[in-house]
Amino acid sequence: MHIVKENESFKQSRVPWSTEPSLKEMAEEAGVDVGGLIEGIKNEHTDEEIASDLGVSEKLVCHLRNRFYSHGIDSVMGQD
């Protein structure tokens, strides 16, 4: 039996998947072309411009942009 000492650190194993939907899944569910969304972000278009190009609301683009910046495209991270 291994006893963990106060000063001993260890890493917990984390699974390499997430229960949260990816940006692609969220965009597809909302009827948004994820490629067009990412292209708009890449080209530094405003939410209004992207929304107009994709035919969706500016609020939706704002939400998806924030999701992209905070979680990336897949939001899957893990370690062994």
Image (spheres, rainbow, N blue to C red):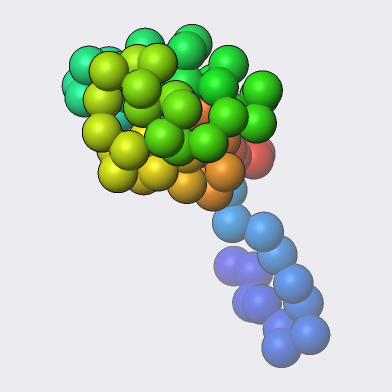
Indicate the position of residue 72 as horizontal and vertical percent values: 56, 35
Looking at the image, which residue sits at the far right? 7
15 up-or-down from 74: above or below: below
**Residue at image coords 41%, 35%:** 48
Residue 14 located left or right of residue 32: right
| Rendered image quadrant of residue 60 | top left
**Quarter of the picture holding the C terminus:** top right
Q: Quadrant of residue 63?
A: top left
69 to the left or right of 8: left
What percent of the width, then of the height, locates residue 59?
A: 30, 44
Residue for point 57% across, 43% down = 69
The answer to whether residue 22 is above or below residue 66 is: above
Counting from the top left corner in percent of width and height, residue 67 is at 45, 43
Report the front residue among 35 and 77: 35
Q: Which residue is drawn at 74% across and 72% down?
A: 9
Front residue of this view, candidates 8 and 78: 78
Answer with left or right where residue 67 lies relative to residue 63: right
Let me know if residue 13 appears in the view: yes
Q: Can residue 16 be seen in this view?
A: no
- Looking at this view, name the residue that lies furthest to the bottom: 6
